[in-house]
Image (cartoon, rainbow, N blue to C red):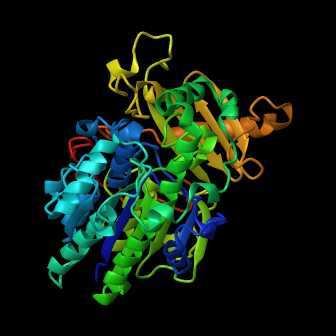
Amino acid sequence: MNKPNIIILMTDQQRADLRKGWGYPLDTMPFLDQFAAEGVDFGRAYTPNPTCMPARVSMFTGRYASAHRVRTNHNAKDALYTQDLLDVLKGAGYRTAICGKNHSHRSPEEFDFHETSGHLGYEGEENSTPAEKEFADFLRATKHMETHIPSPGGLEVQHPYRNVSSALKFIDSCPKDQPFFAWVSFAEPHNPSQVPEPYFDMFPPESLPPTNFGPEILAEKGPRWTWLRGVWEGVMGDAVKERILRTRSNYHGMLRLIDDQFRRLIEGLEERGLRQNTLVIYVSDHGDFVGEYGLVRKGVDLPEILTHVPMIVQGPGIATQGLRQDVCVNIIDILPTICDLIGTDTPLGVQGKSMLPLLRGENVPAGEFDIGYSESGFSGLYWDKEDALTLDAEGAADKDLTRFDCLNTWTQSGQVRAVRKGDWKLQCDMQGSVYLYNLAEDPFEGSNLANDPACADKKADMLMELIAATLRAEDILPFPHYRYRTKLHPRGYWRDESYHSPDIGVRDLSPLGRPKD
């Protein structure tokens, strides 16, 4: 079998809906829209967890955060799995690379090639020129906040440009007879919200479409939301409105910069005669408020703008006529899809499902991709302002509030689960707080219908779907150690009633699974 080359281009914190191809009034990403028109564009792709490290570990392991145990950005060492994407591809003879941001359970040195970068200028980058050093110092001085002047150094010091250069360097180093895998991982459009000319002035604040909701709706969404807005008001002060507008402007400019570098990567493949035999997956780990509700970055709960991510795929044997799939897929589906494509077994413990039939425009079992599911929370009770813990004691902010980490004890505590089916979305937490939204009429989740008598039947139906999705996300590891055989569909499906296991033998499992009888 002639194995395809594989590139996963992952952005960090990219909203799915800010593209003209999906109805947004501004043309932020013209090349990505063109790329989508020539491949498969998933309109309902979800992250398993709207947090960087949990989502990235999920992509590599094909497992939900509740199963792989990396439920925050500080739990890499707790990753639990049998084999991940890197193991699979190395075992299949691939040469591997990471080019850009890591923030996963794997170290860069475990890839065959690595040139990494982060958010604040000194996170793996080799800043060897005066321009690169000036830019790195500029990033470090931002403390992750927005900037009100263009970034120094121009385009070529920006990390997406350098990440693509690294990827092309890696590709040129690969033997012609060996397939390659490159994780091209942009740390943008994540904060610090900064961008150079000409992108800084490309989407000026006064030209931006208004947000759908401001902070006036936050009380409806719960006390953690109002707490988060209160912190931002403390951080940004009286200029909070103007600073959020500048953040939005820079974010839009970074989308266009990313788009230009994605174009450069694809053109690099074409110039090398590699595009036709390279699977390219464009995806983000999670979304961003980008000013909606008077908030920026990310934080509490599982709103669509944080959990809904872009996912566009092109490659050999995949539909090329602009197939738009409005079924629910997830980042955890990437690993089993690649296994299916290259003809290798999916590792035990994987909870994702192969999207390969969807990519080829083929039929799948009815209802198999009807449900979108996401998780958040690291357990325990919610923390609130009445507790003795403070932002600076926790490490979420400096005492003078010049720095603030929106992912912290307050926003990440507890347990929250959400499910989408059709036009409906339901969220529930460990205390039984329920939110129900009709996304067709209320896409930004402003009107909670959970207590509307007219929606009682829909609420009951969605609660059952949430229970079922939560049970499917239950970890299948460890397997029983004696006699019992766990029946697993080769594509990870749950609704294929025609499937009957042909194998009554026992696979050689890892210590996390079941040993040979």
Residue 260 picture location, percent across and down = 42, 73
- Asked whether 474 or 220 is in front, the reply is 220
Residue 173 picture location, percent across and down = 15, 78
**Identity of the residue drawn at 50% across and 15% down:** 385
Q: Is residue 197 left or right of residue 179?
A: right
Q: Is residue 321 left or right of residue 174?
A: right
- Asked whether 196 or 89 is in front, the reply is 196
Residue 96 picture location, percent across and down = 21, 66
Q: Is residue 85 left or right of residue 210?
A: left
Answer whether residue 270 is visible to the viewer in this image. yes
**Which quarter of the figure has residue 433?**
top right
**Identity of the residue drawn at 59% across and 47% down:** 304
Residue 427 picture location, percent across and down = 62, 36
Quarter of the figure with the N terminus: bottom left
Quarter of the figure with the C terminus: top left
- Asked whether 196 or 412 is in front, the reply is 196
Answer whether residue 486 is visible to the viewer in this image. no
**Identity of the residue drawn at 66% across and 48% down:** 211
**Which quarter of the figure has residue 115?**
bottom left
Q: Residue furthest right?
A: 454
* Residue 41 higher or lower than 453, as above or below: below
**Identity of the residue drawn at 66% across and 56% down:** 209
Q: Is residue 295 left or right of residue 454?
A: left
